[in-house]
Amino acid sequence: MSLFWSQWMGQYYTKEAVSWLKKDWNCNIVRAAMGVEDSDGYLSNRAFEKQKVFTVIDAAIQEGIYVIVDWHSHHAEDHVDEAKAFFAEVAQKYGNQPNIIYEIYNEPLQAPSWKDVLKPYHEQVIAEIRKHDPDNLVICGTRTWSQDVDEVIGNTINDVNVAYTLHYYASTHKQFLRDKAQRALDAGIPIFVTEYGTTEATGDGFIDTNEARAWWDFLDRNKISWLNWSIADKQEASAALKPGASGMGGWSENQITTSGKMVRDELKAKNPK
């Protein structure tokens, strides 16, 4: 499961929430979504936001599950030095732990070129990570809110352990995006779904159960890992929790939303104890 933007749902960046996700949701991976540019994000409140992410990392290591450290930005190419410094620090602190996965750009927008902007950004940040961590996985965001994975074909990053991000929201992104992903897979491009929703692309609206199932089937067939957006109690359909759900875990059935129940059931079926 993916946590929400760190600066807006920090109450769930706790060891107790991570422990509950493993114990009750059978999660084997969580995602700490470090908000970067927006109000009270990393750029304006570095120590506070960083400590939230470190708390989640420490909890995941203690629980023996994976953790994605996500630079949750739509404009990371404007803050290359900050990203390099942050991921260098994370790699130096945690790079010897096999639990760590680096997601160095959440969702680039439509405008930046893969070849001229995004790939050079990723290469610079990866170079800093590799000074301290030679082999843990790095996941690289792709153009158009991490949908254009096929643009990587013929222009991949030269590194020992890199994958490329695919994001989808099931009620909006349907067979056309699965076809795009399949083209990348057929070309040998490794894909990781670090974020998806059962809803419309807004994070709200209609939950398309049939499309959610079609996506899960596609990911299963292609052995693609996924994380659902999000552990949050925001009043929107993609949030897994209802308003007021505790940051300490222990959520009862009546504190979990329709989407949250769907995803929790899928996780428990996929990862039986």
Image (spheres, helix red, strand yellow):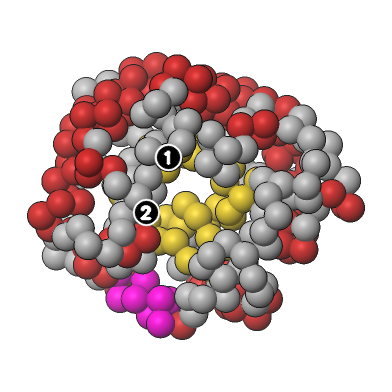
Q: Is residue 122 visible?
A: no
Q: Amino acid at mark 1?
A: Asp
Q: Say which of marks 2 and 1 sits in front.
A: 1
Task: List x then y, in percent, for residue 65.
Answer: 58, 35
- Could you tell me which residue is drawn at 68 percent across and 50 percent down? 234
Report helix, strand or loop for mark 1: loop
- The magenta segment is 176-184
* Residue 49 highlighted magenta (yes or no): no
Quadrant in the rendering for residue 212? bottom right
The extreme left residue here reads 116
**Vertical position of residue 62 compared to residue 23: above or below:** above
- Could you tell me which residue is drawn at 49 percent across and 40 percent down? 33
User: In the picture provided, is 82 more to the left or to the right than 33?
Assistant: left
Report helix, strand or loop for mark 2: loop
User: In the picture provided, is 57 more to the left or to the right than 167?
Assistant: right
Disc 2 marks which residue? 107
Label 2 Cα neighbours within 10 Å, binned few <14 / some 14-19 / many ≥20? many
Disc 1 marks which residue? 38
Prevailing secondary structure of the magenta residues: helix
Task: List x then y, in percent, for residue 91.
Answer: 34, 24
Q: Which mark is residue 83?
A: none
Q: Is residue 118 visible?
A: yes
Quadrant in the rendering for residue 89? top left
Task: List x then y, in percent, for residue 30.
Answer: 57, 41
